[in-house]
Amino acid sequence: MVPDLGVAATASWSGPKSRTRVVAHALAGPPAAWIVGMPVIGVVAEVTTGFAFVALPLPAALLVGVAVARRPGDAPLTGAGAPGSLAGLLGRGEARRWALGELLANSAWAGTLVFGGALFTEKFGMSTATTGLALAGVATAYLAGNQLAGRTDPSRARRAMLEGSMGASVAVALPWALTPPVGITLLLFAAAAFVAARRTVAGTVYGFQVSGDLGREVGSIRAATDQIGYLVGSLLGGLALAIGGFSTLAVGFGGLFLASTLPYVCIRRACRTRLALEPTL
């Protein structure tokens, strides 16, 4: 949830023209943590699984606590804190469509992360240490996609988000559907991570565009969709494994990414006219 609070803070740290770059920096923390943390946790888990949940998170939490305690406070977010502001944001049709799309996309990617390690250990028989290195490589690709997305024109956020959802639906489905040799599977997962990262940055920037001055509420929705997404992705992944094995996950997770575009589908002339008249930032 902490990265999502950072997303909310970008509302005060950036303007519309610099928002994509700042949002990308704010979202870079989790993949960077995976790059460092997954190999460490994989090695520790070879000795004892229980200690793996303490070896890295506890020192990291202490360092974060010290850093937060020593830094000056931020200025309040402009326009945030009004009673009912979150309800007011979700009262907008564009914001509701955005929140639903993010929930579906986050569920797809969260499920991929949850069950990705299981594919390497169960399908290919990799050790936890080697799997940790493999997931760190996937996180490196995600970080690369994140940083490239930071250079995207903010006015293209909506289109980049939808294109990213379509691309991620294919990229995420391929490793589960094909399960080729481990090297190719790792490359496919890395490609999926790269595309998903770009889609996440674009989706967050578009959330700011439909929120007006309710920047904190965008972070709240981002946090909620991330956390609920892990529940939905884990549940759907477990059901898919029980029904048809790893190959069925391709339908589940690829389908969720594809479904994240459905809230934006409109065939009525009024919708096409409204989108054509939307100002670019």
Image: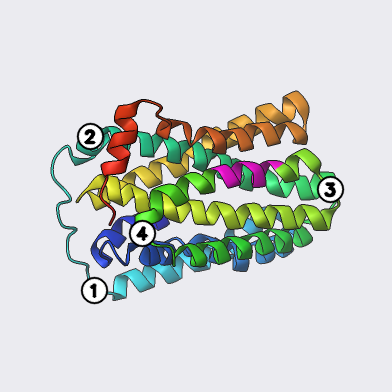
Q: Mark 3 points at which residue?
A: 180
Q: Is the magenta stretch mostly helix, strand or loop?
A: helix
**Circle on res. 223:** none
Q: Which of marks 3 and 2 is nearer the N terminus?
A: 2
Question: Could you classify mark 1 by the number of other residues whose Cα lies within 10 Å: few (under 14), some (14-19), or many (20 or more)?
Answer: few
Whole-angstrom CA distance, mark 3 to mark 1, is 51 Å
Q: Name the residue under label 2.
A: 87
Q: What's the magenta region?
A: 166-173
Q: Mark 1 points at which residue?
A: 72
Question: Could you classify mark 2 by the number of other residues whose Cα lies within 10 Å: few (under 14), some (14-19), or many (20 or more)?
Answer: few
Q: Mark 4 points at which residue?
A: 154
Q: Do the residues labelled 3 and 1 touch (CB within 8 Å)?
A: no
Whole-angstrom CA distance, mark 4 to mark 3, is 37 Å
Q: Are marks 4 and 3 in contact (CB under 8 Å)?
A: no
Instruction: Tell me the amino acid under the disc marked 1.
Output: Pro
Answer with the quarter of the image where residue 119 lies.
Answer: top right
Whole-angstrom CA distance, mark 2 to mark 1, is 31 Å
Instruction: Tell me the amino acid under the disc marked 4.
Output: Pro
225 in relation to 9, above or below: above
Instruction: Tell me the amino acid under the disc marked 2.
Output: Ala
Query: Which numbered disc, 2 or 1, marks the residue closer to the eye?
Result: 2
Assess whether residue 228 is covered by the magenta stretch. no
x then y, percent, for residue 194 = 59, 58
Query: Which numbered disc, 4 or 2, marks the residue closer to the eye?
Result: 4
Q: Which of marks 4 and 2 is nearer the N terminus?
A: 2
Instruction: Tell me the amino acid under the disc marked 3.
Output: Pro
